[in-house]
Amino acid sequence: KTLKTNLGPKRSLDCYLYSFRSAAIEPLTHEAGMQLLEKWGFNISPTYKKCTTLEEVIEYIDYWETAKKKLPIVIDGVVIKVNDISQQSRLGSTAKSPRWAIAYKFKPENIATVLEKVTYQVGRTGVITPVAHLKPTLLAGTTVKRASLHNADEIERLGIYLGDTVFIEKGGDIIPKVTGVDTTKRGLDSKLVKFITHCPACSTALVRQDEQALYYCPNAKACPPQTQAMLEHFIHRKAMDIHTIGKKTIALLVEKGLIRTPADLYSLRYGDIYALDGFKDLSTKNVLRGIEQSKQRSFERVLFALGIRHVGEVVAEKIVQHYQDIDSLAQASAEELMAIPEVGEKIAHSITAYFQESKNLQLIESLKKVGLQLRIAETKAALISRLLAGKSFVISGTFQNFEREDLKSLIRSRGGEVSSSVSNKLDYLVAGHKPGSTKLARAQALGVQIIHEEAIIQMFEL
């Protein structure tokens, strides 16, 4: 604990503020807010400038594309904002970003290094991703040793050989990728890189879906990396939230042959876990308790945990609002699914394809038998009143009297809508203990009303 406490000062951490919002003080412009922050002693970047014409904006961008190298930090572009606060309010925001600001990205730095070898990774859904291993080189502030080669088509397009001098850059100045090859420096004994034909983990022949650039390992049932990643996704806090199990425990259970599918977790016994390296009585009981408690997770959490391709947390919530049990969902056509908000053609076909696989149907039957929530509870589906009709809520943090899922159910049972993201259309952010800092800041910036547990209880008229 002492070591962790002393790390902050050693790393010279600092904070720079880029905007100001307050219910008590409302500056007329963004610039005025920055001036207030500076007056009060906060750190602000001295690089900002108010531009009155588009030409001035372009001049500002051109200047910093060169001058950025003089800054003490690495930047990848500039942000252009509407200065007038009232206009910002009129423009509003989407669920992800304000309409009154836009980022202009500089052209990424591009440097040369040597390709030493290519390896292949197997993802949770079986997708094979080629990875270039490079001679370490400094790029945009960090030492790069590996870079993405994306897929088989990209390898063929590049015509890349082992030992080639390649050009790399960071996509959005974050993810390194190979963008080209200097063929003039190619050695006579260089070997052409060809995409593999079999899975590097289980040797199964790879398949390629029509009109897609990706190759897959179809051996989802017995390919170790897929099994490992699928189980890690299943226990994730946003899925089944089995927080008493970590990646290392999953790896041990897979290695010992104790689990192959999520359903196998619910068949584990005391002796299975106690026999694992590092486990004693208390830790064994904690694992079993966490597994048992996960049976209470709601239908949408279970649906997300299944790991259906393209079905994220938000999409799972939308689907459950239309299909209140797994059997109804399994019978749905792609056209019916596309009628659900946020479900497009790609997601719809992914869902129907999932339920056409016999192994997936077997898994669902196994999960039914162990007691997972594969339908909306009757109390959750029932509409008690319309007290909250037309009102939307985001839940963040932990609460003294409710589990978050129970709180969502209470809101929906009274006609309210529960969202996962803060936008200017949101009515309330219900903030419990330690709410998400991003959601809280966004709600404050957008003027969304923030309420606490006592207020929501009064709304329920409990």
Image (tube, rainbow, N blue to C red):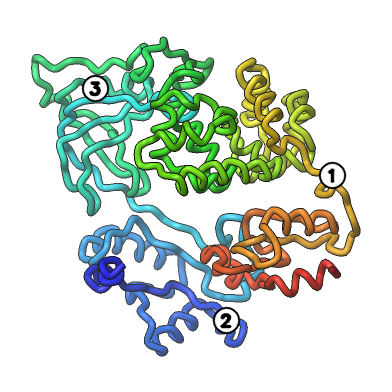
> Which amino acid, mark 1?
Glu
Residue that numbered label 1 is attached to: 378
For residue 315, say whether it is visible.
no
The label nearer to you, 1 versus 2, is 1
User: Is residue 275 visible from the viewing direction of this image?
Assistant: yes
Residue placed under numbered mark 3 in the picture: 160
> Looking at the picture, does residue 344 appear above or below residue 89?
above
Q: Which amino acid, mark 3? A: Ile
Q: Quadrant of the C terminus?
A: bottom right
Q: Residue 22 carries which label?
A: 2
Q: Contact, CB < 8 Å: mark 3 with mark 2?
A: no
| Left or right: residue 126 compared with residue 383 | left
Residue 85: x, y in percent? 58, 75
Q: Is 373 placed left or right of 263 in the picture?
A: right
Residue extending furthest bottom?
39
Q: Is mark 1 on a helix, strand or loop?
A: helix
